[in-house]
Image (cartoon, grey):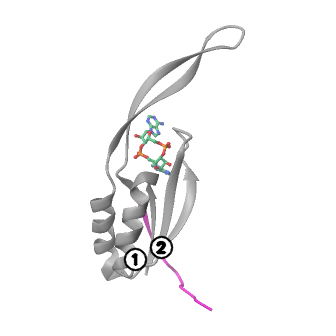
Amino acid sequence: MKLIIAIVQDQDVPSLIDDLTEKEFRVTKLASTGGFLKSGNTTLLMGVEEELVKEAIKIIEDNCKTREITTSLLTVSMPGDTYIPYPLEVQVGGATLFILDVDQYIKI
Ligand code: 2BA
């Protein structure tokens, strides 16, 4: 068994979870926050049999879109703590996946 850790954008989650559960994948949804943008995203934990990993990745690909996000980071411009926002464009997603071997899967 593998553990897929998928970091996805919140907007993609409802349809993604619907499609995963329809195909009988089991999913746990965690609220998370991106370190760079400091805004909310979603982390999904999925225990998946090895032969089904490709199918799970395909469903994630089909549901997770790449988006251009314009954000404003603050920079110090002058002494005395004066901050000036400057716009920054970043591409977020579709999804960031970590796929790990599962040593044991126990349900009690
Ligand atoms: P954030 O850390 O909020 O990053 C959002 C987007 O900002 C990233 O999109 C990337 O395009 C950009 N970005 C991140 N760090 C940057 C940096 N140091 N300099 C310039 N641009 C930067 P994605 O790569 O699609 O990542 C989306 C979210 O997935 C991230 O949100 C983070 O929560 C997670 N993530 C991505 N790679 C990760 C990794 N290697 N380890 C842990 N979490 C990761």
Relative to residue 35, is residue 79 depicted above or below?
Answer: above
Relative to residue 4, is residue 81 depicted above or below?
Answer: above
Estimate the spatial distance between the alpha carbons at disc 2 and disc 1, rounded to whole Å. Answer: 8 Å
User: In the rendered image, which residue does mark 2 sit on?
Assistant: 27
Secondary structure beneath label 1: helix
Q: Earlier in the sequence, mark 2 or mark 1?
A: 1
Label 2 neighbourhood size at 10 Å, few (<14), some (14-19), many (20+)? some
Which residue ends up furthest to the right in the rendered image?
Answer: 80
Magenta stretch encompasses residue 67: no
User: In the rendered image, which residue does mark 1 sit on?
Assistant: 21
At 31% from the left and 60% from the top, the residue drawn is 63
In magenta, the rendered stretch is 97-108
Q: Quadrant of the C terminus?
A: bottom right
Q: Are marks 2 and 1 in contact (CB under 8 Å)?
A: yes
The percent coordinates of residue 94 (x first, y second) are 34, 51
At 38% from the left and 70% from the top, the residue drawn is 18
